[in-house]
Amino acid sequence: MDVYGLIGNPVGHSLSPPMHEAAYADLGIDARYVTFEPPADAGAAAVEAAATLGVSGLNVTIPFKQDVLTAVDPDPLAERIGAVNTIDFATDPPTGYNTDSVGATRALRSGGVELDGRAVVVGAGGAGRAVAFGLADEGMTVDIANRTEETAHDLAAEVPDATGHGLDALGDLVSDADVLVNCTSVGMKEDRSPVPAEALHADLGVLDAVYDPIETRLLRDAAAAGATTVDGARMLLFQGVEAFERWTDRDAPVEKMNVVLRERL
């Protein structure tokens, strides 16, 4: 039996175990997906222990996405992003990937959004970094808007064909954009949007990485403006799908994983 899992602190809230185990059951794969909660300073040590124990693959979440870089050989994308959220132990040293990036682009495409033209990414933290690199790699011009404008400029200097801005520029940026992705937590705990509603328009594809609630204020405003909307559960789904496919070398049962994920939201 293969063992896969998730390291993070805390991990009790994770929706990854039911989503992955539904995929194993659907495809008849003899595997389990378990969670590990090492101390906050022991991310790299946890990866080394997992390798010793014969774990086949790990997902990685807060606060370990940067810490585990020292224990893996990151692929070029994960190295550029500066964070790892998926580890494959089939190699020595284990290979580190960042599937948040592909999770966002696959989520957008699955929702009918074309990835060309200009994109606006709100937030320059971990998710914002992953999404900005992913959209740039698709050939999009990327505008990054962040509360601390200097951080947006720093990230834009690393991302091809990107420009950094403060949040006060969002109105103008979104009015001219083809794709908008919110990578902040705004909208998670309050009915609030990081983007002025009047800037949203019908030619826009909007992804909100917040998945609880599924329908955020940003997505409601975007739908009212006639935009194409993609909820955060799709990004969560496809980052898991990408990890599953890397580990097993099999096509994931996407719809089965999606149903199980949404049942638990």
Image: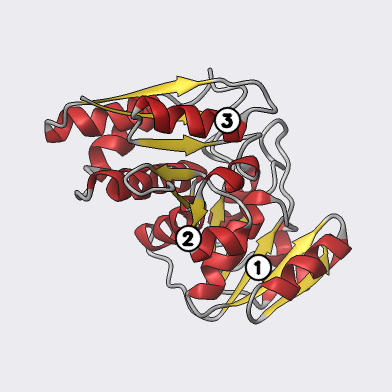
Residue at the location (29% across, 36% down)?
257
Q: Earlier in the sequence, mark 3 or mark 1?
A: 3
Q: Residue at x 21, y 42 (%)?
A: 253
Q: Amino acid at mark 2?
A: Asp
Kind of element beneath mark 1: strand
Cα separation, mark 3 vs mark 1, equals 37 Å
In this rendered view, identify the residue nearer to me: 116 or 85. Answer: 85
Q: What is the C-alpha distance between the residues marked 2 and 3?
A: 20 Å
Say which amino acid is labelled 3: Ala
Q: How is the image coloured?
A: secondary structure
Residue picked out by circle 1: 120
- Amino acid type, mark 1: Val
Front-lying residue, 153 or 212:
153
Residue 191, position as x, y percentages in the image: 70, 36
Question: Residue at coordinates 43% horizontally, 66% vertically from top-left?
Answer: 113
Give the residue pinned by disc 3. Answer: 45
